[in-house]
Image (cartoon, helix red, strand yellow):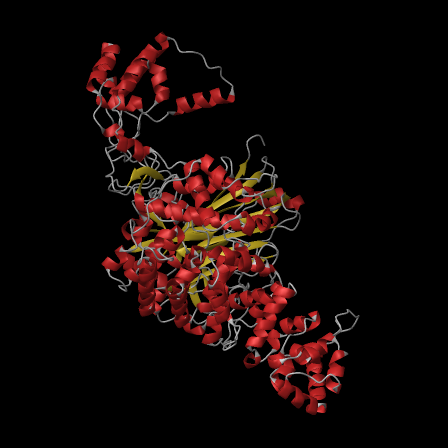
Amino acid sequence: MHSSGTLEAGIGFAYQAFSDDRIVRAMLGQHSEDVELAKASGVLEAGSALRAWLADASGNLIDAATVLLPEVTEHELIDLLAPAEEAGEGGGPRSHDYTLYRSVVHTLGLRKGDRVTQRTVDLLDEAAAKWEMGQEVLEAVLTVATQPGHRLNADQLHRTLVSHSPADRDAWWGVDTYSMVNETSALHRLLRWAEQLPTPDRVRSLATPATTWVRRPGAFMAATGSAQEPPEEVVRLAAVTLVWTFTSPNRFLRDRATKAVVQLLLGYPNVLVGLLDQFLDRDSALVDDTYLFERLVLAAYGVLARTDASHSQPKLLARIARRVLDSVYGNAAGAAHASRNALLCDAAARIVRMAHRTGGVSDEEEARSHHPHACPEVGEAPEESTLDARYPIRGEAGERLWASLRSSFSGLADFTNYQVRPAVDHFSDLPLTTPRPPQPDSAPLVHEAVVLFRDSLPEAVRNVLASDEGIRALLKNSWRQQQVLTEGQQQLLAACAPVPTREQLLAAAAVDKEWASRWVLDNAARRGWTPERFGAIDDIYGRGRGGREGHKAERFGKKYSWLGLHELVERLANHRHMQHGPTRQFTHYPGAAALYLTDIDPTLPPAPHPLSEPADAVPAPDADTRHDTFRPTALDSQWNLPAPSLPERDRLEEWIGSTEELPDLAQLGSRTLDGAAWVVLNEYVSDHAAGKDWTGQAEQWHIVHSWLVDDAHHEQVMEFLKSRSLMGRWMPEPPAWHAVYLGEFPLLEHDTDDDNTLSYPGDAIGDTEPPVAPSGGPVTSGADGSSPSAVDPSNLGDEEIFDLLEQFKGRRTKTALTDEDRLANLHKLAAQWSEPLPAPTVPDRFARSTDGSPLRAYPAFQEYSWSSSGHDCSMEAPAGLALPCTRLLNGAGLHRDPDNGNWHTVDGQLVVRALRGTRPTGTINTLLVRRDWLTQRLEQLQMRIVLGMFGERQPRSSDHLRTWREYSQTALLTLDTGGLATSRLLTQVRRSPGR
């Protein structure tokens, strides 16, 4: 662009900006007298040669002059070129030439910080106001945000942002930064710089093993090196800038920024503490955005977890926990108080619990984070008619008003049905101030009605079916009532049930989703969402994003809806009992994670950015792995065994029929790396021949599992398994945790067996289902609603279930039962229930020790996973790791590498490796444990470890008619020699029915 404002064709060369700088410096030196006069007067004389040269200079030379002239004259170029007749005292009115304003904006990042004056700031404001360059001005300001001492750095950005109300701030800052995450902008560069920073050596106590590549978080594979760490002040300014993006409704920006802030603050504890002081305390009332507060506290938890602060920095952990207690659980009227947001409370409570476990905070301090705590009452939701009057969907002329916001809260809206309902459905209408009443079915039956019902039954069945147990069992099963009782008898039976008290009705009633939706909608509007601020922009952002998937950028209305929902959940948690009933899941508020409200794991390292180029990755990723958080490990023929030999299609049947070169646990169960022996705790390997997928090419896969068994029973376990294929699932499966952060491992023992959660199935060796007692007389649940010890006869039997299914499918015409049919069923049921219940026994399918007790086995590994298809938009591929089980980890003093799944001892010895590799034929996932450490740990636990391998040779085909080979093998790790005592390989060819 020419200085006159006209566009001209031109060619740019590398280092042109450098040459422009040299040219302008030369001209200033050549016309030094003009420069000195301008410095004194503030204006270049109208007839001066320098002014004439600048008037004819190209745009790039004007840019250079915009940078250099303030350095030598202390005046802005736009002022120096002001017409002489307009120049007055103090500079007078200024030129409004677009090119000069544009140059001021675009060269801000090239200036020396001490040469940016208030006049520069005024010109930037004028450029935004008069020339509609607001977006470009913000880009320029973000360019200098991390420059220490700069007038317009992140500190000024912070002062500007807190001067706006949250809604007005969103309407400016939120809108202007919404799309920057995927643009070549200053914010985009800052974000990617932060997430790609190497983890500082001072928080990584484990030396990098020679055979393992360590990925720089947020980037592709790179060898660890001693990169120069950024100065603390630069980190602080960068963090302040990125923390403000936590206010964005764009999940891709907000989520990536969350992990970027965590990565940025590793090794910078003072910056972390300063951020918490600044946002949660000093300026919290001005910030007043719980969307920011909850993510900042969550990022703080991520830093503490990834640096293993419980062991490495206990004093820092205690300091931050007390800061969180003061800010989040202190003044109930504070903007950052826990009562305002369930996710803020959840993140803060995690920090407090972490500090409590290390003794950093006392029991009394930790109790402050428990529910109930200080919190406003739930309040009432406006009626629908009130909402229509306050927030009309359309105006009188038919224009859209509140339609964008209200569309999420209609009766069939996804947000109402898939977010609001699951979040509030576990809460009852019973206030916590009222003691929880007993279950209605534990109250005494109505005596007068029982007598009438008893008299209506044949005398032969009265003692069984008219007993308390019989009546309660019949009351719980309307289907069975219809099979054995007439309509009159059913009415008499219903009268036997005790009338629930008001408290019991409230305890059994779940919070209504429609009521909750109205509450959240009103809350969102009161927070500042208005059609004037966000209606048009939400219509743009919402267009084409109406799918039900959570993995998407969201509208501003959705941000305000989430804030309302999370505040409602927190109020319910502090003022309502959990729902009381036979299907209840929780006895007390279980936290945000159990209600599926947590949406990002801050303890995961940043995943590669979607725009990252894989050119420098080692090994080179394929389309399936380029976005993985944990990048594949380079294959070295040590940790990975060679790929199997796979046949062409014409030899497929012969290959399946052959037993040659089948996997052997003697080789698969151990590895030798760097001269040390390692044991495989878990492995999944799948290889297939070349060709288009699922077209019949050869495939071979195997899985290695491992279990801990009591030392006294290991021989009996091996005897039980030696003749059984593991394809029959004789052994218990490893736990796969939901909504557990990676940084929380190893879990405490009581975390894995909490009375408040559904328990994991039993660990007896045999079928995966736990033993149950056979059916017998009527048994009902106890007074506390707990499950009975034997099968409840009110549950439907197989015959009943199949009967209902057949009726549903229309294959059997439902015929009306006659009184004779019911009478026969009545006597049959009475005969069945009159038989005493046998004591629960262990079925024969379960292995037993010599004393008759069931043998127990405990999976020696566990699985962590985090989905990429949900609300977490910081990753484009799911993250997963296999880890040693809780029994092996707890008390062992191991520490996990902050960037991957490797674990090491306190003295830095690597003892656990989680490795993943890819090769042309398939993938390998392996969890290795150093053998000498494992044997020592087993001796401490008085346990042994059993390995099991199972897999298949098969055609890679979707055809259900196929032939394949199964194979299975078990092995015991011997503690004296450290070798594997393997059983015989069990294998057979299987064929689909009909083949």
Q: Quadrant of the C terminus?
A: top right
Residue 199 in the image, given as x and y percentages of width and height: 47, 69
Image position of 752 with respect to 292: above or below? above
Residue 752 location (% of width, % of height):
33, 50
511 with respect to 877 (left or right): left
Question: Where is residue 132 shown, x and y percent of the image?
Answer: 64, 63
Position of residue 509 relative to residue 324, above or below, is above
- Tell me the residue at 22%/28% (across/down): 443
Task: Count all numbered tags in the image, as a single digit.
Answer: 0
Q: Quadrant of residue 720?
A: top left
Front in this rendered view, residue 194 or 386 = 386
Foreground of the two, 235 or 379: 379
Where's the N terminus, which quadrant?
Answer: bottom right
In the picture as drawn, the residue positioned furthest to the right comes out as 9
Residue shown at 64% from the left, 83% from the top: 42
Where is residue 379 shown, x and y percent of the image?
35, 42
Determine whether 393 is above or below 1 in the image. Answer: above
Q: Is residue 789 above or below residue 659?
A: above
Can residue 653 be seen from the camera position used here?
A: yes
Q: Is residue 929 visible?
A: no
Left or right of 867, for residue 894: left
| Image quarter of residue 284 | bottom left
In front of the other: 931 or 436: 436
